[in-house]
Image (spheres, rainbow, N blue to C red):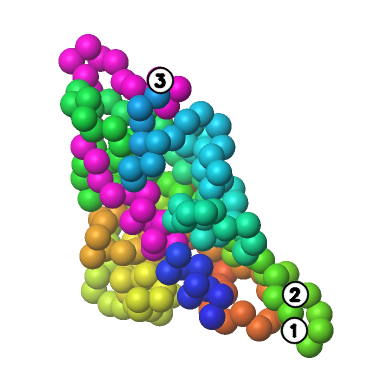
Amino acid sequence: MKRVYILLALAAVLTFITTPVQTQENSSGACRKISDGGITYHGQPITSGYDKWGFNFEGHIFNGIFNNHLMPEPPLVVGDNLMMKWNEAWLSSKNCNPNPSVTELDRNNGSRDYKGTGAWITNHATGTYIENGFTCKWSDFVKIVAVPKEAHLDSTIISPKCKPSLESGFDGYMWRLGGKELGCSMWSDSFDGLALIQEISSDPCGKKEHLLNYRTQSKFGLSGN
């Protein structure tokens, strides 16, 4: 059930990272940076560089033990690995709110609608398990993007590639762009305009269920745009 584990955790990552916080530029035009101090992430003070969990918010990256993305105390020291990368549109490295009591990093202008924002996040999970005395290495890479404004959601029929379930996070519908598949709609009960456009999985021992391979028919998002 490894893919179920990955995608449920990815759903937690999505909620944890993208809970909207209103972005409002200060009247002075200045924004507070992490290096200025006083910036937080879900109540935790953050500083420049990597923290004890594996987050580097200035670098838009997390690299550490998988479940440390939830910031447990104390941080875990063993477990599967996770590398997340995101862009400024997904989670900003600044706080531009004019209210000094708001210390959280800015997120999507306080909106649940990501369509046309250019936001994206990648997750690369790796780990091992024992099968018949052998150590088996598995990996799963996922990319989720905010769909462009001109994309449309084909809600006329359930796509067999986007079978809806709590485990997959899919809504059942396919985003399309220019007549081509863009990707499966994700978590529309909480966010609008997100699509999984790529998944690359490897499990040579073949015992981890639900690992998939998928690539959008569109070029959008595959080069990081």
For the residues labelled 1 and 2, say whether their Cβ atoms are less than 8 Å apart.
Answer: yes
Name the image quarter holding residue 28: top left
Q: CA distance from mark 1 to mark 3?
A: 50 Å
Q: Residue at x 50, y 72 (%)?
A: 5
Task: Single out the mark in the foreground, 1 or 3.
Answer: 3
Residue at image location 54% in from the left, 48% down from the top: 53
- In magenta segment, residue 27: yes
Of residue 187 and residue 80, the one placed in the foreground of this image is 80
84 or 76, which is in the foreground? 76
Near mark 1 (Cα within 10 A), the count class, few <14, some 14-19 or many ≥20, is: few
Which of the 4 image quadrants contains residue 177? bottom left
- The disc placed on residue 179 is none
CA separation in Å, label 2 and label 3: 45 Å
Q: Earlier in the sequence, mark 1 or mark 3?
A: 3
Percent across and percent down for residue 183 are 41, 62
The residue at the far front in this view is 74
Return the x and y of residue 104 as percentages of the image width and height. Answer: 31, 36
Name the residue beneath numbered marker 2.
136
The residue pinned by badge 1 equals 131
Q: Secondary structure at mark 2?
A: strand
- Above or below, 72 against 94 in this view is below
Please state which amino acid type lies under the numbered disc 3.
Answer: Asp
Say above or below: 97 vs 217: above
* Lateral position of residue 144 relative to residue 74, left or right: left
142 lies left or right of 148 = right
Looking at the rendering, the stretch of residues picked out in magenta corresponds to 10-36
Q: Residues within 10 Å of mark 3 (few under 14, many from 20)?
A: few
Q: What amino acid is at disc 2?
A: Cys
Q: Residue at x 30, y 40 (%)?
A: 107
Q: Secondary structure at mark 3?
A: helix
Using the image, tell me which numbered label, if any, was put on residue 36. 3
